[in-house]
């Protein structure tokens, strides 16, 4: 859509109000975005509600390109090293924890963690290098490949577990090997939920709009 006051293009994210009751973080997100004014954060311009259609419209700053296009435009690409994943796989724990997502981010920002004593010197050195707070001192992928813990031949602790073959009732054999079916069963998922959520996930853009008039549903098609 086009903001007639500033002649700037805007993106509009549409939420159904009945869905908002199941997503309590949306209100907190709006409160945070109203206060955040940073060039690396998409700005929330306005929030409009249509009681008749039971919908909420979040008018946001329009990004010319997507996230992947922005990453591809960087000349030097830096690939992530999954430090927390290696820590979790080798110890069964997480390096950073928090009672909520904000406390978790705060603990990650402090870089304060503890390595279990039974990890041994090689693994402890590896995890310390991967979780180094200073990015300049943190292990690179080349250092990891040369590290003695990776070069060491580790003994097999438990017998190999065979992957069960998919049953004839399984539509997607690869999907059945993931935790997705268990999560769907836990949260009461149905295929109808996907159809209802499609509209919530789409960000609509339009070049023109009429001042003081809510955009009609058909106009976004």
Image: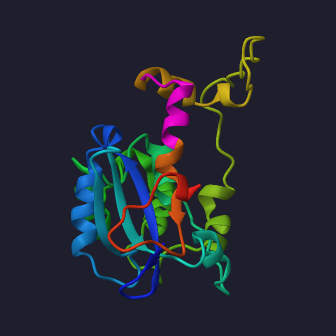
Work out whether residue 88 or residue 43 is closer to the camera in this orientation and state it: 43
Residue 65, x across and y down, in percent: 60, 76
Q: Quadrant of residue 111?
A: bottom left
What residue is shown at x 56% (from left), y 26% (from top)?
191
Left or right of residue 3, residue 79 in this image: right
The residue lying toward the viewer, choosing from 106 and 188, is 188
Residue 200 on image: x %, y %: 46, 48
Q: Nearer the viewer, residue 37 or 71?
A: 37
Q: Quadrant of residue 79?
A: bottom right
> Which residues lie in the magenta part?
188-197
Residue drawn where x is 30% and y is 70% of the image: 46
From this view, report whether residue 64 is shown above or below residue 153: below
Quarter of the image where the C terminus is located? bottom right
Res. 112 in view: no
**In the image, what residue occupies the spot 72% across and 31% down?**
174
Which x, y percent locates residue 98?
25, 51
* Tally of numbered discs: 0
Q: Is residue 191 magenta?
A: yes
Q: Is residue 34 a member of the stretch shown in magenta?
A: no
Q: Is residue 183 left or right of residue 96?
A: right
Question: Most prominent secondary structure in the magenta stretch?
Answer: helix
- Examine the rendered structure and indicate whether residue 199 appears above or below residue 108: above
Q: Is residue 50 above or below residue 8?
A: above
Residue 63 drawn at (x, y percent): 52, 76
User: What colour scheme governs how the chains and residues are painted in the rendered image of this protein?
Assistant: rainbow
Give the side of residue 191 with respect to residue 215, left or right: right
Left/right of residue 50 with respect to residue 137 in the rendered view: left
Q: Toward which corner of the image does residue 24 lie, by quadrant?
A: top left
Q: Residue at x 55, y 35 (%)?
A: 195
Residue 70 visible in the shown view: yes
């Amino acid at each position: 859509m086009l903001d007639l006051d500033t002649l700037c293009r805007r993106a509009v994210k549409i939420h159904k109000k009945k869905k908002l009751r199941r997503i309590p973080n949306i209100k907190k997100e709006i409160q945070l975005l109203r206060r955040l004014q940073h060039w690396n954060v998409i700005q929330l311009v306005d929030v409009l509600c249509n009681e008749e259609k039971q919908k909420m419209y979040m008018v946001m700053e329009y990004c010319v390109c997507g996230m992947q296009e922005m990453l591809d435009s960087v000349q030097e690409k830096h690939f992530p090293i999954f430090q927390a994943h290696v820590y979790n796989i080798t110890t069964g724990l997480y390096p950073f924890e928090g009672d909520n997502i904000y406390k978790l981010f705060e603990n990650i920002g402090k870089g304060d963690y503890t390595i279990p004593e039974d990890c041994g010197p090689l693994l402890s050195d590896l995890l310390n290098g991967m979780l180094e707070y200073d990015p300049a001192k943190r292990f690179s992928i080349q250092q990891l490949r040369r590290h003695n813990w990776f070069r060491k031949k580790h003994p097999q602790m438990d017998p190999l577990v065979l992957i069960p073959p998919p049953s004839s009732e399984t539509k997607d054999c690869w999907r059945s090997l993931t935790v997705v079916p268990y999560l769907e069963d836990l949260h009461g998922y149905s295929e109808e939920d996907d159809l209802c959520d499609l509209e919530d996930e789409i960000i609509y853009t339009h070049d023109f709009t009429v001042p003081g008039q809510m955009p009609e549903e058909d106009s976004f098609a």
